[in-house]
Amino acid sequence: MLWAKMVVWAIPIAIGLTIVLNIALNVFSSLAAGGRSPSATTDERDRKFQLRGMCVTTVIFGLGFVGALVGLSTGWTPLTGIIAIYLAATVGDLVGNLVRIVSYRLGS
């Protein structure tokens, strides 16, 4: 049951790191902008880019989840299945955010 303890500890640590990094990046971006507050308004283009990134994240996570279920049905251990699902969520979020950044950069 060592893997269960590792998962129980990994989830709150990942959440905590996400919160700390989000705060640190917001402080850094505020300092880089010279103390000016960035505009909080969003337009249709921003929503389109966010939706595109969210769709990519959902597709990658969904494929990873189904892949983990197929793997579990073919004899993977539960730990391998949990790692596959966690990896799919992480990669999906990373790729979704990259798609959003590239969309902003290209303006399309």
Image: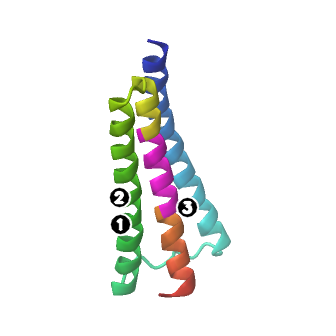
- What element does badge 1 sit on? helix
> Identity of the amino acid at label 2?
Thr
Q: Position of residue 58 (x, y in %)?
A: 35, 58
Q: Is residue 63 above or below residue 71?
A: below
Please tell me how crowded label 2 is: few (under 14), some (14-19), or many (20+) other residues with Cα within 10 Å: some
Circle 1 residue: 55
Most foreground residue, 39 or 93: 93
- Marks 2 and 1: CB-CB under 8 Å? yes
> Identity of the amino acid at label 3?
Asn
- Marks 3 and 2: CB-CB under 8 Å? no
- Marks 3 and 1: CB-CB under 8 Å? no
For this view, does 107 lie left or right of residue 28? left
Q: Nearer the viewer, mark 3 or mark 2?
A: 2
Furthest residue in direction front, as rendered: 74
Most foreground residue, 91 or 64: 64
Name the mark on residue 26: 3
Q: Which residues are magenta?
A: 85-95
Name the mark on residue 58: 2
